[in-house]
Image (spheres, coloured by chain):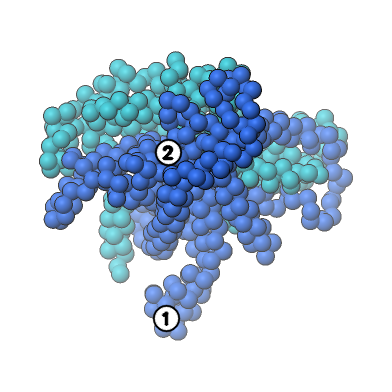
Chain colours: A blue, B cyan
């Protein structure tokens, strides 16, 4: 999802590790004897079973797919020969690999930088006290709440070469029509613009709530010392917001890496792979052709899983460290 | 800067941000013959309801399917996550922390990977093109988030309220049902809203698991419109407007829950 942007896009906005009580490691004195273990696990049994059946098993099947040579027939019958890492070798040698890696990196980095910068600027702006501030801030959530297919199809039409409103506006400024979605030099930019639009609300909301925990007294003292607005931002706001910024950026990273819907709906990764990322490449291999290549598709996907989990673990570490401090 | 000036600036920023949404609505009212007009009409001066008529004619079954799938996902998600949240927050069994960590990691898995795994499994079980199958898949978008929300919320319920009743395991069930769950109404609302919205918006699972089936959700309804190289953009955008209604309703009726859900993920209280 740009799901789901999760999805947040960060469709995905996502949740914290249980922050206080559920961490068993801390040696807290308990006021009452714990309930019998079996009772607690009876409550957890459905979700544990669910995790096994609907996360672990699909992941395992995906891993299995990537290690076998599947055809459509053997996919149904499940007797494909084991070929080890052959699918991984195949995708590494594929001419799509290098561009997909580059596009994934560029897409993720550019989206993150702009989403964060715009989100932070807006958070600081809306942190001020003025009429309608809260209402307008709530309206900013709209792009984040819309189904990705809605956002993507709206942007597709806005960026249409002949009849799109974006080219009309550019034309009024004297800039020639841009083939946003049909030119290989612009397609990646187009999907990046749409994804930034979707991701700004998440950054705005999270950073805004971070701003609220900065004591107002600090600003008053700085103002007394004659610090201007610019100095107050760089000396107080930005440093004190660092923990929240780190969390926002890391979550954004995990969720931007896996953005699929937006790109697939707007360009299908094209034209000529010019906006292909690992996510769309994996999907195209598995489902986009008449002859599905499930093995290589799963292999590409698993690379993405590894990347997401690495950054996910960093996120968990950072967040736990903050929760403890 | 004076305060009225700030309000004006705030309105300007919001206007720019929401322009695509306005444009979607504008195009949904535009006549076919004006669609390719250059420059396009900035307001629907020759407004037509033709697009919405097409939605009524063609998209109602998709909307119905989406509604069923959304509600099914909500029920499944709450039923799975609320007891788990209670156990993690209040019963705190050994190993609960590991489970919490696994739930967090589960959220990091890209949707297309899950979709491919589900596809392989459903193909063998004959569950492709089935609504219950899609409900189960869509619930994976919400369950980890839901457990973490319930855990955080139920941790805040004072232990004294639960202590008295809790002498043995059987009582735990009654405590959960008649004390904890009613007190967690806000968490139930938050979780239900997000579960509904995410399954309503799902495109990846729908596209892989029920594509071409008898019951397809509205996201596929829109996708087929675009994919058929349909040039009736008023109908496409009208469908998009209708598909956005749950988001609008949620924003109007439950804005504080939404903001709570967004920030729950990232920030310390």
Please tell me which of labels 1 and 2 falls first in the chain: 1
Structural distance between the alpha carbons of marks 1 and 2: 46 Å
Q: Secondary structure at mark 1?
A: loop
Q: Chain of mark 1?
A: A
Q: Residue at x 17, y 33 (%)?
A: B35
Q: Chain of mark 2?
A: A
Mark identifier at residue A227? 1
Residue A10 percent location from the top left of the image:
48, 47
In the rendered image, is residue B77 in sight? no
Residue underneath mark 2: A261
Residue A115 percent location from the top left of the image:
41, 56
Which residue is nearer to you in this view: A221 or A113? A113
User: From the image, which quarter does the C terminus of chain A lie in?
Assistant: bottom right
Looking at the image, residue B169 sits to the left or right of residue A270; the answer is right
Q: Label 2: few (<14), some or many (≥20) within 10 Å?
A: many
Q: Secondary structure at mark 2?
A: helix
Q: Residue at x 35, y 54 (%)?
A: A132
Q: Residue at x 47, y 34 (%)?
A: A285
Mark identifier at residue A267? none
Which residue is nearer to you in this view: B200 or B186? B200
Looking at the image, residue A260 sits to the left or right of residue A70; the answer is left
Q: Is residue A271 above or below residue A46?
A: below
């Amino acid at each position: 999802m740009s799901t789901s942007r999760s999805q947040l896009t960060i469709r995905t906005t996502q949740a914290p590790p249980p922050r206080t009580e559920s961490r068993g490691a801390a040696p807290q004195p308990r006021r009452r004897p714990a309930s019998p273990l079996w009772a607690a696990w009876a409550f957890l049994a459905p979700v544990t079973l669910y995790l096994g059946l609907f996360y672990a098993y699909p992941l395992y099947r995906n891993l299995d797919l990537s290690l076998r040579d599947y055809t459509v027939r053997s996919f149904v019958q499940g007797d494909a020969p084991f070929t080890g890492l052959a699918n991984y070798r195949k995708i590494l040698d594929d001419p799509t690999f290098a561009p997909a890696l580059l596009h994934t990196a560029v897409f993720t980095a550019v989206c993150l930088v702009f989403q964060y910068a715009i989100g932070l600027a807006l958070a600081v702006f809306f942190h001020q006290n003025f009429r309608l501030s809260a209402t307008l801030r709530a309206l900013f959530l709209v792009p984040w709440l819309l189904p990705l297919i809605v956002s993507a199809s709206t942007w597709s039409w806005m960026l249409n070469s002949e009849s799109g409103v974006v080219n009309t506006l550019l034309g009024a400024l004297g800039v020639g029509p841009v083939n946003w979605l049909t030119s290989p030099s612009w397609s990646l930019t187009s999907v990046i613009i749409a994804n930034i639009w979707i991701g700004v609300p998440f950054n705005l909301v999270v950073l805004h709530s971070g701003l609220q925990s900065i004591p107002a007294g600090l600003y008053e003292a700085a103002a007394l010392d004659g610090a201007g607005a610019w100095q107050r931002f760089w000396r107080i706001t930005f440093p004190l917001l660092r923990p929240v910024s780190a969390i926002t950026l890391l979550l954004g990273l995990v969720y931007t890496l896996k953005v699929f819907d937006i790109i697939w709906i707007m360009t299908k990764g094209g034209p000529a792979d010019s906006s292909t990322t690992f996510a769309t490449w994996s999907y195209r291999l598995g489902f986009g052709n008449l002859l599905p290549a499930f093995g290589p598709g799963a292999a590409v996907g698993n690379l993405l899983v590894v990347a997401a989990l690495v950054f996910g673990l960093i996120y968990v570490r950072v967040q736990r460290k903050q929760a403890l401090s | 800067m004076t305060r009225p000036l700030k309000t004006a600036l705030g309105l300007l920023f919001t206007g720019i941000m929401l322009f695509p949404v306005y444009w979607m609505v504008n195009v949904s009212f535009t006549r076919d013959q004006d669609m390719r007009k250059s420059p396009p009409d900035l307001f629907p001066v020759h407004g037509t309801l033709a697009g919405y008529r097409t939605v009524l004619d063609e998209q109602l079954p998709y909307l119905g399917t989406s509604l069923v799938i959304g509600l099914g996902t909500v029920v499944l998600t709450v039923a799975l996550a609320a007891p788990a949240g209670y156990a993690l927050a209040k019963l705190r069994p050994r190993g609960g922390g590991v489970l919490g960590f696994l739930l967090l990691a589960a959220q990091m898995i890209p949707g297309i990977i899950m979709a491919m795994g589900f596809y392989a499994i459903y193909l063998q079980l004959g569950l492709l093109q089935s609504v219950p199958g899609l409900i189960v898949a869509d619930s994976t978008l919400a369950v980890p988030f839901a457990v973490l929300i319930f855990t955080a919320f139920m941790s805040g319920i004072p232990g004294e309220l639960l202590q008295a009743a809790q002498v043995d395991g059987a009582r735990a069930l009654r405590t959960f049902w008649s004390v904890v769950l009613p007190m967690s109404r806000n968490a139930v609302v938050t979780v239900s809203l997000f579960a509904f919205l995410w399954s309503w918006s799902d495109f990846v699972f729908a596209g892989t698991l029920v594509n071409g089936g008898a019951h397809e959700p509205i996201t596929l309804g829109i996708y087929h419109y675009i994919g058929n190289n349909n040039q009736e953009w008023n109908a496409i955008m009208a469908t998009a407007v209708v598909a956005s209604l749950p988001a609008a309703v949620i924003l109007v009726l439950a804005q504080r829950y939404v903001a709570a859900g967004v920030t729950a993920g990232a920030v310390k209280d």
